[in-house]
Image (tube, rainbow, N blue to C red):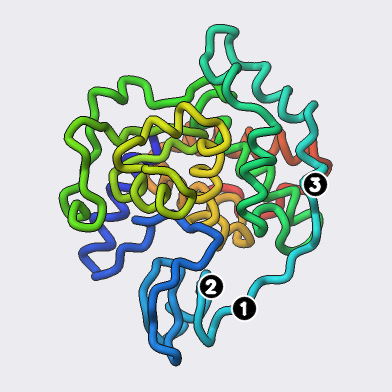
Amino acid sequence: MEVAFMMKKNVLTLVLVGIIAGALPRCIEAQHCGCATHQCCSRWGYCGTSKDYCGTGCQEGPGYTLPPINHVSLPFLTQKLFNGIIHQADASCPGKKFYTRAAFLDAHNSFYEFGRIGSVDDSKREIAAFFGHVTHAIGHFCYIEEIDGPSKKYCDEVYTKSYPCNANKRYYGRGPLQLTWNFNYGAAGKSIGFDGLNSPETVTNDPVISFKTALWYWMKFVHPVIGEGFGKTIRAINNLECDGRNPARVKKRVAYYIEYCKQLNVSPGNNLTC
């Protein structure tokens, strides 16, 4: 689905400038780059000493410090709020029997920063943003996998040395944010603890793993810009919609976000579009 096209475009663009930012969605645990003691491991998993490596998203090294958390335990994601989203899906939707609030909260235990950085209002806005994008991506939790996904392999040969594709598997969009491409399945599996390259279907069979892949992507690629407004999260999720290229889809994302902010009794903030 949408993440597939955005991710592929980002990878191709970033390879041209020698950086693969966006290729590997951010996991909250450090990736242990193996950098020298004076170097930082960047949010993208590379070693260096400039602010690009030691600044926002730095995972380890002299520039890395654990961000303070606000001890929010996600009481804002009530069963009522969750039900208000999923109950809008048609009764025939496979996701209605798959996605649960309990599975999300279980997955969240592995990503302590999500919804817990900054003020309580900041936490509410991040929760609203995450579920706004999920609602848009999989239709109020209707879909578990990409429509017509089995016909698409999504094997990027640039990354087959590190993430070799299984000839019998397909790496199409699965889960709340539609994890896509072999390099994402391989990296996500290594971090979360499942065989993403040889068993990508785990994302559609295990709801906790499914939510973990979405949170993994979010924390790598979206969370670092959450403080810059919802519009920045749209650009991080699907840059192809921005700059007037698909205003209707941007408008829908913003509408979901604003609705969830209202339900959480928090201002949506500024910079809502991209």
Residue positioned 21% across, 48% down in the render: 164
Residue bearing mark 1: 65
Q: Amino acid at mark 3?
A: Val
Q: Is residue 15 left or right of residue 234?
A: left
Label 1 sits on a secondary structure element that is: loop
Is the residue 34 above or below the residue 149 in the image?
below
Q: Are marks 2 and 3 in contact (CB under 8 Å)?
A: no
Residue bearing mark 3: 266
Binning the other alpha carbons within 10 Å of mark 2 as few (below 14), some (14 to 19) or many (20 upward) gives some
Residue bearing mark 2: 56
In the rendered structure, which disc, 3 or 1, sits on the residue that comes first in sequence?
1
Marks 2 and 3, how far apart at CA: 25 Å
Label 2 sits on a secondary structure element that is: loop
Q: Is residue 220 or residue 8 the one in the foreground?
A: 220
Point out the image quarter for the N terminus: top left
> In the displayed image of the protein, which residue is found farthest to the bottom?
38
In the rendered structure, which disc, 2 or 1, sits on the residue that comes first in sequence?
2
**Image coordinates for residue 32, horizontal then vertical, percent:** 44, 72
Binning the other alpha carbons within 10 Å of mark 3 as few (below 14), some (14 to 19) or many (20 upward) gives some
Q: Can residue 15 be seen here?
A: yes
Q: Amino acid at mark 2?
A: Thr
The answer to which image quadrant residue 181 occupies is: top left
Is the residue 255 above or below the residue 270 in the image?
above
Marks 3 and 1, how far apart at CA: 29 Å
Q: Please tell me whether mark 2 or mark 1 is closer to you in this view.
A: 1
Residue positioned 38% across, 26% down in the render: 146
Residue positioned 54% across, 84% down in the render: 63
Is the residue 18 above or below the residue 242 in the image?
below
Residue positioned 65% across, 17% down in the render: 88
Marks 2 and 1, how far apart at CA: 11 Å
